[in-house]
Every structure is written in C-alpha cells, then in structure tokens.
Image (cartoon, grey):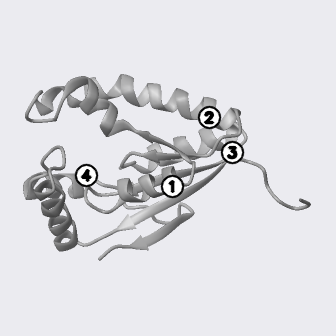
Amino acid sequence: MVGTSTKPVVHLLAGLPGSGKSTYARALEKDGVTRLSVDERIIARHGVLGADYPASVHFELARPIVDEVRQELTRLVRCGRSAVLDHALDRRSEREAYKSLVSANGGNWRLMYFKADRGTLLRRLACRYARGGVGDVTPQMLDWTAANWEEPVDEGEEVLEQS
C-alpha cells in the first residue's frame, strides 16, 4: 500500500509498579507483538527480589539481563519485527537510549506512560498479590520507587491515565 509504513514499532512502557505495563504488554503479545520482559527473566534466573536474593545485588543481577534484552530488541527491529519492552524505564536517559536504539535500527517507537496515583497503585498491587502474583511491592518500596522515578514530560509520550 502506498504511504503505509512497514517499519516495526517498539512500544516502550513507562510507569510505576502496578500501573498496568505488563497487562498492556500481554495484550500486545496476543496480537503477535514480541514481548520482552526484564522482570520475568530475572525471576526465572534468580528468583524474587527480597525472598530469593537481597536488594543489594539486584542491579548487579539485572544488568546482564537488561543487556540481553537490549540485544534481542535490536535483532527484532533489524528483522522488521514489532516488540513491546515490558520494563519500567524509570529514567529519562534510559528512555532516550531505547528510543535512539529503535530509530537507529530502522524502527519506530511509541513511549506509553501509564500514569496512576498512589492509591490506585496500592490497590492494584494488593489485587495482584491476592491472585498469586510474584514479588511483593510494599508501600515503602512503592514510595522509594516513586521518589526516584523521573516522570516522562515532553518526551513524545502518550499518557494513559489509570484508575
């Protein structure tokens, strides 16, 4: 078709725990988009943060997995495959690096910001763990994450208000 882009699309998801990133990513996966989940790979290899290994080694354990996912994402885009990065993307610099990676390898990106207030996040996290979800984000952990989070502003983000 004339005027139709055949470039792959990479969905970059940003949001705090419980904001809906993984739910969104799984829906895209059902539509044939390749889902890359950093958290699931960490859990499969090392277990659950706080239960199977201490927080003090989390970033050390996560680093090679994040690098692996970045390499896989690069291969997918170069092969013309769309993907969704199921990862929090807490920092603007991280989001910018992924946007550059996608563009440099011939893809288009969509930055999706899942915005939710603390009450909504706590309610969703409680429901997740009541259903047998993995991990446990306490209110204190959520507050720490929120305090260290860089909210996407003027980054080309699409804001999805969560309630």
What residue does disc 3 label?
A: 107
What count of labels does the image hold? 4
**Mark 1: amino acid:** Leu
Instruction: Report, in whole angstroms, how far the alpha carbon at label 1 lies from the one at label 2.
Output: 15 Å
Marks 3, 1: nearer the viewer: 1
Residue position marked by numbered label 1 in the rendering: 28
48 to 159, vertically: above or below:
above
Q: Which residue is mark 4?
A: 148
User: As shown in the figure, which amino acid type bears the numbered disc 4?
Assistant: Asn
Amino acid beneath label 2: Leu
Residue 60, percent from left and from top = 26, 24
Q: In the structure shown, which secondary structural element does the residue marked by tag 4 occupy?
A: loop
Say if mark 2 contacts mark 3, CB within 8 Å.
no
> Counting other residues with Cα less than 10 Å from the Cα at mark 2, is it few (<14), some (14-19), or many (20 or more)?
some
Q: Residue at (54%, 52%) from the top-left corner?
A: 11
Mark 2 vs mark 3, foreground winner is 2
Q: Which mark is residue 76?
A: 2
Nearest the viewer among 22 and 15 is 22
Specify whether 154 is left or right of 118: right
Q: Secondary structure at mark 2?
A: helix
CA gap, disc 3 to disc 4? 30 Å
Between circles 1 and 2, the one closer to the viewer is 1
Q: Quadrant of the N terminus?
A: bottom right
